[in-house]
Image: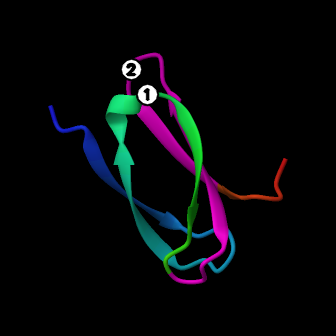
């Protein structure tokens, strides 16, 4: 099984599409990674679905 997955999504600050390398072996998690375009901190959250797959969501660090 491949535990690293590429995920592309728009940066919540600048809107540019960025590509993240997500570690699926760690399960649900939240961490901060800087945008590769505008260098602002993005909160990345991985949540587990009922079927065991993970969803990736991005938000700016000031969102509740």
Which part of the image, by quadrant, shows the N terminus?
top left
- 45 above or below 16? above
Q: Does the magenta run of residues contain 53?
A: yes
**N-terminal of the two: label 2 or label 1?**
1
- 64 above or below 26? below
Q: Residue at x 40, y 31 (%)?
A: 26
Q: Which residue is mark 2?
A: 52
4 with respect to 17 (left or right): left
Q: Residue at x 25, y 38 (%)?
A: 3
Q: Which residue is mark 1?
A: 27
Q: Residue at x 48, y 24 (%)?
A: 49
Tell me the SS state at disc 2.
loop
Tell me the SS state at disc 1.
loop
Magenta stretch? 37-58
* Percent x, y of residue 22: 38, 48
Q: Nearer the viewer, mark 2 or mark 1?
A: 1
C-alpha span from label 2 to label 1: 9 Å
Q: Residues within 10 Å of mark 2 (few under 14, many from 20)?
A: few
- 8 above or below 43? below
Residue 10's disc is none
* Percent x, y of residue 60: 72, 61
């Amino acid at each position: 099984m491949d535990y690293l997955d590429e995920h592309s999504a728009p940066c919540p600050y600048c809107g540019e599409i960025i590509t993240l390398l997500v570690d699926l072996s760690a399960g649900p998690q939240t961490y901060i990674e800087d945008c590769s375009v505008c260098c602002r901190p993005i909160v990345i959250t991985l949540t587990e679905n009922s079927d065991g797959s993970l969803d990736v969501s991005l938000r700016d660090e000031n969102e509740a």
